[in-house]
Image: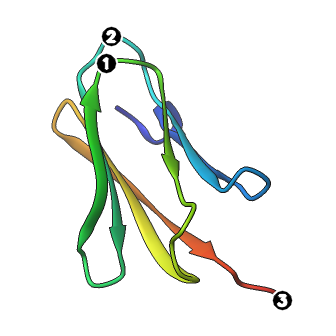
Amino acid sequence: MIKDDVVIYLNEEDLKVYVKVEMDIETHFQLQDLPGKVLQEAVHDKGLHDFDLTGLKDGNYFVIVSQNGFIRSKKVVIGYQP
């Protein structure tokens, strides 16, 4: 897994974070809060996964993706208004 193999993006309209990875490789997905508590997680070999953020408080969260011994993470901010 290289940097461009993983795409993580927030869709604010449906309050979901989408994670796109290479298909047919077992991948571990986690959504954590700032202190590191795992809020959601899944393991599968599909190319697309989503985390539903409905009901989460405003703040910082982290999406962590582990595939083939490589880990990628991205911070997601809910409720920030510039």
Residue 28 visible in the snapshot:
no
Q: Earlier in the sequence, mark 1 or mark 3?
A: 1
Q: Which residue is mark 1?
A: 45
User: Disc 1 residue type?
Assistant: Asp
Relative image position of residue 37 (x, y in whole percent) = 23, 73
Q: Which mark is residue 24?
A: 2
Location of the C terminus (image quadrant):
bottom right
Marks 1 and 2, how far apart at CA: 5 Å
Label 1 close to label 3 by CB (< 8 Å):
no
Q: Is residue 57 above or below residue 51?
A: below
Dot 2: what SS? Answer: loop
Mark 2 crowd level (few <14, some 14–19, many ≥20, 10 Å Cα):
few
| Image point (69%, 80%), residue name | 79
Q: Looking at the image, what colour scheme do you see?
A: rainbow
Label 1 close to label 2 by CB (< 8 Å):
yes
Relative to the observer, which residue lies in front, 81 or 8?
A: 81
Relative to the observer, which residue lies in front, 21 or 2?
A: 21
Mark 1 crowd level (few <14, some 14–19, many ≥20, 10 Å Cα):
some
Dot 3: what SS? Answer: loop
Q: Is residue 62 above or below residue 43?
A: below
Mark 3 crowd level (few <14, some 14–19, many ≥20, 10 Å Cα):
few
The answer to whether 17 appears left or right of 63 in the picture is right
Q: Is residue 67 above or below residue 58?
A: above
Marks 1 and 3, how far apart at CA: 37 Å
Marks 3 and 2, how far apart at CA: 39 Å
Can you name the residue that lies furthest to the bottom here? 82
Location of the N terminus (image quadrant):
top left
| Image point (28%, 38%), residue name | 42
User: Disc 2 residue type?
Assistant: Asp
Q: Which residue is mark 3?
A: 82
Relative image position of residue 59 (x, y in whole percent) = 54, 84
